[in-house]
């Protein structure tokens, strides 16, 4: 059995419907669907999940007494999981109909411990935004990509339950709990892969955690990534200590400045020359712009 875990907060009801139905209608039927409601005041969502649970006994939902955040909610979901495998899902994304069947077959065929897959970005209205994002297929490229960015899309994960148990679930690493989990899995010797097929439509939401807390997320990623490059895992205590240190505060401040400037650029006129000049100014005056650009170039050069 595969235990699909998901946390909901304030996602629109229409998004959650599409997400839930994409899991309940999977070609692979031996699943349980564990949903954590992280907003106990969201009565509409609770009623929706109750109606699904009455029709399909595979879905179970639990309501947090107060908002705990994604990390704590996912760890709570893991406590209820009975399956041999754990799959992730987000409340505003849509899984392909054969996602679980395809990923499970790929994991078993290649004797892997955790797999992801490619994703197709969609906007708030479900319109396709770009070509699918393709991730490396096997561990050698995945471990290299992890030196620069996350090598698996979090809502596409499917893995053996023992991986989550041995790593004690997710750590409270601000908006970067998935990347931290992956580098810990890699350093622990687990074998990781990505199905070379689009298994999920990933909704780009301007109000999501990754958008509203981008500077803090990138600061966390920087610290965890630097430890990973040295062959070290990051503890929650180390992370908190770094974030409170002068170095951590400066990194956060510099990234906030960078994202303020790029946000301003997006709101400027559509004149391409004006935008190009402003972007050049950001690149010259903002150290983080140069660091992010260099990291992107290195990833393209060294990850195959």
Image (tube, grey):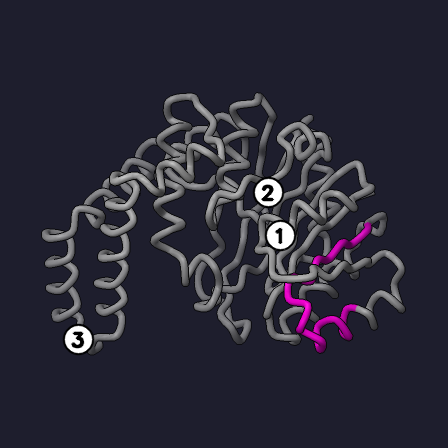
Q: Could you classify mark 3 by the number of other residues whose Cα lies within 10 Å: few (under 14), some (14-19), or many (20 or more)?
A: few
Cα gap from disc 3 to disc 2, whole angstroms = 39 Å
1 and 3 marks in contact (CB < 8 Å):
no
Q: Which residue is mark 1?
A: 199
Determine which residue is flagged by label 2.
Answer: 116
Which disc, if any, is residue 115? none
Which numbered disc flags the more N-terminal residue, 1 or 3?
A: 1
Q: Nearer the viewer, residue 202 or 39?
A: 39
- Indicate the secondary structure of the residue bearing disc 3: loop
Image position, residue 95 (x, y; %): 66, 57
Q: Which residue is mark 3?
A: 271
Mark 1 falls on what kind of element? strand
Circle nearer the N terminus (1, 2): 2
Camera-nearest residue between 117 and 248: 248
Which residue occupies 37% across, 26% down? 229
- On-image quarter of the C terminus: top left
Q: Is residue 34 magenta?
A: yes
Left or right of 264? Residue 27 is right
Q: Is residue 173 left or right of residue 185?
A: left
| Horizontal and vertical percent position of residue 118 | 54, 48
Q: Are marks 1 and 2 in contact (CB under 8 Å)?
A: yes
Magenta stretch, residue numbers: 32-49
| Residue occupying image coordinates x 82% and y 59% | 59
Q: Which comes before the other along the chain, label 3 or label 2?
A: 2
Residue at 57%, 22% (x, y): give it: 188
- Which of 299 and 35 lies nearest the eye of the viewer? 35
In percent of width and height, residue 109 lies at 71, 30
> Label 2 neighbourhood size at 10 Å, few (<14), some (14-19), many (20+)?
many
The quarter of the displayed image where residue 194 is located? top right
């Amino acid at each position: 059995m595969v235990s699909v875990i998901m946390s909901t907060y304030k996602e629109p009801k229409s998004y959650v419907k599409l997400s839930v139905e994409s899991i309940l209608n999977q070609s692979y039927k031996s699943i349980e669907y564990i949903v954590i409601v992280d907003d106990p005041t969201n009565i509409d969502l609770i009623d929706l999940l109750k109606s699904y649970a009455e029709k399909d006994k595979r879905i179970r939902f639990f309501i947090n007494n107060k908002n705990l955040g994604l990390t704590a909610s996912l760890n709570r979901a893991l406590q209820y999981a009975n399956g041999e495998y754990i799959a992730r899902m987000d409340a505003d994304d849509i899984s392909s109909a054969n996602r679980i069947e395809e990923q499970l077959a790929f994991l078993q065929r290649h004797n892997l411990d955790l797999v992801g897959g490619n994703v197709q970005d969609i906007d708030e209205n479900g319109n396709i935004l770009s070509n699918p994002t393709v991730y490396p297929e096997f561990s050698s490229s995945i471990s290299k990509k992890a030196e620069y960015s996350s090598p698996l899309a979090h809502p596409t994960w499917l893995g053996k339950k023992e991986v989550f148990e041995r790593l004690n679930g997710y750590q409270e690493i601000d908006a970067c709990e998935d990347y931290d989990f992956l580098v810990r899995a890699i350093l622990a010797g687990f074998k990781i892969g990505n199905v070379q097929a689009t298994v999920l439509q990933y909704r780009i939401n301007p109000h999501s955690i990754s958008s509203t807390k981008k500077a803090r997320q990138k600061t966390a990623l920087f610290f965890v990534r630097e430890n990973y490059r040295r062959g070290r895992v990051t503890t929650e205590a180390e992370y908190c200590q770094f974030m409170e240190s002068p170095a951590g505060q400066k990194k956060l401040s510099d990234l906030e400045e960078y994202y303020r400037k790029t946000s301003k650029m997006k709101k400027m006129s559509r004149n391409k020359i004006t935008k190009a000049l402003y972007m050049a100014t950001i690149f010259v005056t903002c150290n983080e712009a140069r660091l992010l650009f260099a990291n992107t170039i290195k990833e393209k050069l060294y990850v195959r």
